[in-house]
């Protein structure tokens, strides 16, 4: 309702239908409209600015920004390249170390094989450990490729495994060979002279000086004075001097309770404590002590009791 530039606004309440009249003059209404229009304009400008901002194209980087970006990327790639080169070098160093170890083990295997050749276990004309193994074959028509690092590593691993297996087998063979050689050395057999004949047997006989029946605890092997008297087995010299009735005497302990004696020697060529090999010269044949001429009195004693030396003289070589 409008009267005398006065605007009445009727406000009706929800309860009991009561109403209230608010009177506004023209100036008040104008001020309210101005404020409302200003708010609408501000809201419209904010929405417009937001829309313009969303559709605005991004700014292009400058030349200096591009240079800085690519320099940074190149720096990263150089760092990665250095790390890769170091990794490759570490792998090469590791493979080189393993190859050096394999080379050392091959040298030991060659030396062991050469020992087998020298000992006669392996024929020298069949195996020559001083020369590389002979290999060959026709050239393949397919193009050849280099091995990759993983393939090379696998090949080295397989080679090391095979070498370890061969080393164990050869060590076992060497132990067996050494044991067999030791047993052969200690195996008592053969005559204690290189030339001569049996002049008196083991057992009861007529004494050459008295003619009475006496016990002879060894055999006499006559020969040329000064000829070699040799050991019938490997052992250790336990006596090398003069003894009553024996003249110059050499006694050798062969272990396991077995001892041999070589008497009436002209000269003794060994000393107590010497380690003797089978066939080594112990003394020279003579006629010292109770003797009628150049010969060697040969005895075999086991656990303190004499045995017939002819049993060992007639033994076949092992």
Image (spheres, helix red, strand yellow):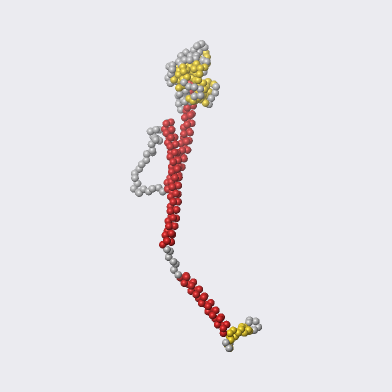
Question: Residue 231: where, in percent of width, then height?
Answer: 47, 23
Q: In the current view of this chain or complex, which residue is farthest to the top?
A: 210
Q: Is residue 295 visible?
A: no
Quadrant hosting residue 279: top left
Task: Please give the count of numbered marks on the rendered protein.
Answer: 0
Q: Residue at x 46, y 40 (%)?
A: 164
Asked if residue 312 is positioned above or below residue 210 in the image, the reply reads below
Quadrant hosting residue 30: bottom right
Question: Residue 202: where, in percent of width, then height?
Answer: 50, 18
Question: Residue 10: where, in percent of width, then height?
Answer: 61, 84
Camera-side residue: 123 or 2?
2
Q: Residue at x 49, y 24 (%)?
A: 274
Camera-side residue: 12 or 220?
12
Asked if residue 144 is positioned above or below residue 315 in the image, the reply reads below
Q: In the current view of this chain or complex, which residue is farthest to the front?
A: 27
Q: In the current view of this chain or complex, which residue is farthest to the right?
A: 16
* In this rendering, position of residue 102 left or right of residue 36: left
Quadrant hosting residue 70: bottom left
Q: Is residue 107 visible?
A: yes
Question: Residue 317: where, in percent of width, then height?
Answer: 45, 26
Camera-side residue: 93 or 244?
93
Q: Residue at x 50, y 13 (%)?
A: 207
């Amino acid at each position: 309702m409008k009267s005398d530039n006065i605007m009445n606004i009727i406000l009706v309440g929800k309860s009991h239908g009561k109403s209230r009249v608010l009177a506004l003059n023209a100036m008040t209404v104008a001020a309210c409209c101005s404020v409302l229009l200003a708010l609408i304009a501000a809201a419209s400008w904010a929405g417009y600015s937001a829309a313009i901002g969303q559709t605005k194209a991004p700014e292009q980087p400058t030349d200096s920004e591009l240079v800085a970006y690519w320099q940074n990327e190149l720096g990263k790639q150089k760092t990665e390249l250095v790390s890769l080169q170091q990794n490759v070098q570490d792998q090469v160093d590791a493979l080189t170390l393993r190859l050096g170890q394999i080379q050392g083990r091959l040298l030991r295997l060659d030396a062991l094989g050469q020992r087998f050749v020298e000992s006669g276990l392996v024929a020298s004309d069949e195996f020559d450990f001083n020369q590389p193994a002979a290999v060959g074959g026709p050239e393949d028509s397919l193009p050849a490729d280099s091995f990759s690092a993983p393939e090379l590593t696998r090949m080295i691993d397989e080679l090391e495994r095979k070498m370890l297996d061969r080393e164990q087998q050869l060590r076992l063979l060497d132990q067996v060979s050494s044991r067999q050689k030791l047993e052969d050395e200690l195996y008592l057999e053969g005559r204690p002279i290189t030339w001569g004949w049996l002049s008196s047997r083991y057992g009861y006989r007529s004494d050459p000086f008295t003619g009475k029946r006496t016990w002879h605890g060894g055999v006499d092997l006559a020969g040329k004075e000064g000829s070699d008297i040799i050991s019938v087995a490997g052992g250790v010299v336990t006596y090398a001097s003069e003894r009553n009735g024996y003249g110059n005497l050499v006694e050798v302990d062969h272990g396991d309770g077995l001892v041999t004696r070589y008497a009436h020697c002209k000269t003794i060529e060994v000393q107590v404590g010497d380690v003797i090999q089978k066939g080594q010269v112990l003394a020279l044949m003579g006629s010292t002590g109770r003797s009628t001429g150049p010969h060697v009195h040969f005895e075999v004693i086991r656990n303190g009791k004499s045995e017939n030396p002819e049993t060992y003289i007639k033994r076949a070589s092992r």
